[in-house]
Each structure stands twice: as structure tokens, then as C-alpha cells.
Amino acid sequence: MIFVFLYIQVIVQVPVLSEWLLAPPQNILVEKGLLTWTNATQEGGVTYSVQYRSLDTKVWKNVAACVQTSFKFCNITYIKAENENGCVTLRVRAERRGLTSKPVEACSQHGDSCSPEVSLTPWPGSLTVHLSRNHSMALEHGGHVKHRVYYGKEGESLLNHIDGASSVSIHGLEEGQHYCIKVQYINYNIPVGAESCTQCEVIPESRNNQKQTQLTVAVVVPIFLLILILVIAYVLIYQSGRIKHCLRPPYEISDILLQPFPEHHILSSTSTPSESYDVISSITPEEFKGE
């Protein structure tokens, strides 16, 4: 029984482990009938498999011409032609020596018949997402087709979303923060086609906040400089002696000076009693002695 349990655990954990060990492809872009991507590792022997999912199903199918291919592109023209509206969702995964990476869905940078074209305008506290109401999906399906805008802070999952037929504005955003969005068509609340590639913008600060920041800087900086000047003046005036003492080099007496003099170097300053001295009162030059 224990062996059966361990075997089941191994079977369950192998796919998770393989996805963790092999990096997925990056920059997966779809433009009209061409899907491209880049590799996340320089290691050799990596192949790629492309899958698609149509509007009326949740099942992913292989693109027959792009299974375990070493190329970094795939022609999906015939796949789009076989499906309703020509709109499919695409994803790519990497494979190497039995390991399989996590599949990553493709996005569209410039928009096409199945992906919205997006531009952003940031405002203080809000972000406007510019979208067109006149696109091929809307012309074919009418008011049932809308845009689903996913948004969130940069580095976080884009879990929040808002729906709209055309341009939408997202309010209540933190000023000074980076926010990112991606957009996808929905038909009867069902996602259609590839998402737009993620775009990010900085939410600017309002003029009132800018003025408040400038006022704070104008008040704080002079006060800080004044305190700094006072501290320096106090140290120079009242602590100069301590500073000099700290900067004064330590006294060192040579070991030679500390050694006692040898006995034969000791000089006596006493005079012998037999010695006598005459006091010179005047000096007469020799040339005057004859005269």
C-alpha cells in the first residue's frame, strides 16, 4: 500500500517538477497569420510545441505543423481559416529531454481582427484605456462583443477587470505607482482571440501633491542645514580641546634614552685642590712692551 501511494505521488509531481526545471519561451507574439517567440535559455536540444483553442471549446489542440519544432515561428494562417471568425487563442511550450515547460499564451502588440488595438493616457489617480468601437468583431456580432480590460500594479497578477464597448477609464489608482493593463475581446462574456500585450504607465501626481512636496522640501532643507551649521559651530567652539587631544600623536620615548649610562662615561665635575687660578685684569699688546 505504501509503494502504491509513493508511486502516485511521483506521477503527480513529475509534471510539476518538469515545468519548474525548464524555462518557458518568451515574447510570444501573434501578428495576423504568424506566431513568433524567443527562447529563455541558450541550452541546445530545446524544441517547441504550439497549441490553439477555438471560441466554442476549452480543449487545447496541437498545431500539427508546429509540434516539437526547433524553429521559433509558426504559420497559423490555415488554423485561423478553419475556425469561426478566424479567432483562436494560441500558446507555446518548450520541451527538452522529457521535460516540458509551462505553456505561455500569445499576445498581440498592434492589434488585428481578433485582438484590440490599445493606447493609454495616465491622469492623476486614473488611467484611460483608448479602445475603438468600430472593429470587425463588433461589426459582425454587434453589441454582444465588448472589451475586457485587465489591470493591476506592475509586478502583480492582473486580476481586476472592467468591461466596456469602447474606451474605459480606471479610477482610484495610487499616484506615483506603475499600473499595467491588457485587453481582450469577449463575446457573450466569453474571451475571444489573443490578448493585447501588457502595457504599463506611471500614474502622475496631482498639482496639489506636487506643490505640497515642493513646500515640504523648501521648509525641511533649510531647517536641516541650520541644524547642521549649529552642530558644527558647537563642536568647533566647545569641543576644540578634545578634538586637538584626539588628533595629537602619542608621545614615544626611545628605548636608548631610558638605558643607564656606563660607568666610564660618568664625568666628574669636581676640581683638584692644588689647582689655582689668576684673575686677568688687563692685556698689553707686544708692540707696546719695547717702548
Image (spheres, rainbow, N blue to C red):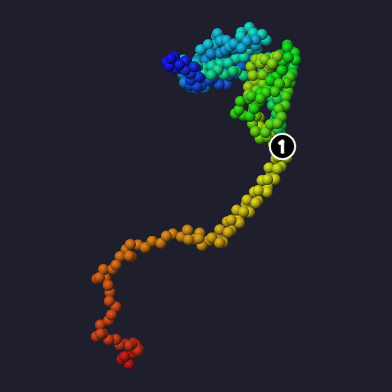
Farthest front residue in view: 1
Q: Is residue 203 above or below residue 24?
A: below
Quadrant into which the N terminus falls: top left
Pick the residue in front: 102 or 92.
102
* Residue 117 seen from this side: no
Residue 178: percent from the left, percent from the top? Answer: 64, 31
Farthest bottom residue in view: 291
Residue occupied by mark 1: 206
Residue 5: percent from the left, percent from the top? Answer: 45, 16
User: Based on the displayed image, in which of its 4 quarters is residue 135 positioned?
Assistant: top right
Quadrant into which the C terminus falls: bottom left
Residue 152: percent from the left, percent from the top? Answer: 64, 27
Q: Is residue 74 above or below residue 224?
A: above
Which residue is at 35% across, 89% downward? 282
At mark 1, the secondary structure is loop
Dot 1: within a 10 Å radius of its alpha carbon, few (fewer than 14), some, or many (20 or more) residues?
Answer: some
Which residue is at 27% across, 76% downward? 268
Amino acid type for the residue under numbered disc 1: Ser
Residue 140: percent from the left, percent from the top? Answer: 73, 11
User: Based on the displayed image, in which of its 4 quarters is residue 260 positioned?
Assistant: bottom left
Which residue is at 54% across, 16% downward? 93
Which residue is at 68% across, 45% downward? 216
User: Based on the displayed image, in which of its 4 quarters is residue 125 positioned?
Assistant: top right
Q: Is 285 left or right of 46, judged from the image as shown? A: left
Q: Is 19 left or right of 143, judged from the image as shown? A: left
Pick the residue in front: 164 or 259.
164
